[in-house]
């Protein structure tokens, strides 16, 4: 349901060649539920090149909700010889996050941020991100994704206690956000769903090691 602008290939290839980098990330124009759209904020990275040594400061933007930069795989162009990793077919959600984090930390040595909104990200109420019917599969996938990302960060000695706490809180926020997608359900059924997911021991650990004490769904 997403699409790219007609000049996407031309502009992205030109950027990766002229900037001599492994990866180029363009901006996304995100369409919202009400039909409006908004060009994303790249948090000051617009028209900048990051080298391997800079990735440590960039990665938190990808995995936490504070000053988040979305992991849009389709907003990337990557040199062929750099792609030696693959999407995880067993993960039910957030494959983009794992792919991009692993790409930057294990394979790529540089990334350029093109200050052009060439990727059109569309709202799809029937997609897995918003489909309440797959609620528990999504939560399970979210927890497994969190474990995988933590493993990657530990391998690179990047998982500080502060980053882990912020990441854990972001996972909890995603869980609460998913709860809000349960449509046509009574308060009692939503309560049962919350109670059920927090029986998961891994999620309990995540909640216990979060940097926020006032955990509540976003309004």
Image (tube, rainbow, N blue to C red):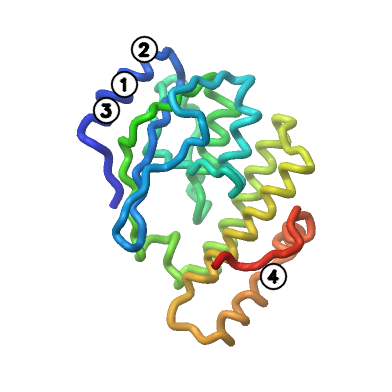
Q: Distance between the residues labelled 2 and 4?
A: 50 Å
Instruction: Indicate the secondary structure of the residue bearing disc 4.
Output: loop
Tell me the element at label 3. Answer: helix
Mark 1 or 2 closer to N-term? 1
Q: In this view, does 159 lie above or below 52?
A: below
Any mark on residue 198, and which? 4
Looking at the image, residue 173 sits to the left or right of residue 92; the answer is right
Local crowd size for mark 3, using a 10 Å CA cut-off: few (<14), some (14–19), many (≥20) = few
Q: Mark 1 points at which residue?
A: 13
The reply to whether dot 1 and dot 4 touch (C-beta < 8 Å) is no
| CB contact under 8 Å: marks 3 and 1 | yes
Residue position marked by numbered label 3 in the rendering:
9
Pointer 3 or 4: first along the chain: 3
Residue 144 appears left or right of 128:
right
Q: Which residue lies furthest to the left in this view?
A: 6
**Residue 18, label in figure:** 2
């Amino acid at each position: 349901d997403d699409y790219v602008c007609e000049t996407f290939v031309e502009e992205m290839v030109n950027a990766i060649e002229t900037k001599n980098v492994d990866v180029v990330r363009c901006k996304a124009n995100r369409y919202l539920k009400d039909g409006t759209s908004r060009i994303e904020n790249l948090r000051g990275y617009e028209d900048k090149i990051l080298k391997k040594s800079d990735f440590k400061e960039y990665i938190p933007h990808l995995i936490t909700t504070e000053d988040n930069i979305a992991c849009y795989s389709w907003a990337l162009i990557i040199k062929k010889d750099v792609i030696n990793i693959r999407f995880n077919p067993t993960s039910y959600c957030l494959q983009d996050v794992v792919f991009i984090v692993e790409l930057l930390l294990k394979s790529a040595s540089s990334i350029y941020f093109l200050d052009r909104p060439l990727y059109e990200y569309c709202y799809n109420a029937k997609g897995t991100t918003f489909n309440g019917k797959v609620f528990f599969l999504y939560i399970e996938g979210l927890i497994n994704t969190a474990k995988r990302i933590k493993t990657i960060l530990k391998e690179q000695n990047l998982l500080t206690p502060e980053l882990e706490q912020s990441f854990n809180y972001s996972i909890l926020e995603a869980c609460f956000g998913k709860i809000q997608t349960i449509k046509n359900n009574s308060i009692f059924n939503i309560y049962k769903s919350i109670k059920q997911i927090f029986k998961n021991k891994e999620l309990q650990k995540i909640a216990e090691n979060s940097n926020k004490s006032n955990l509540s769904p976003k309004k």
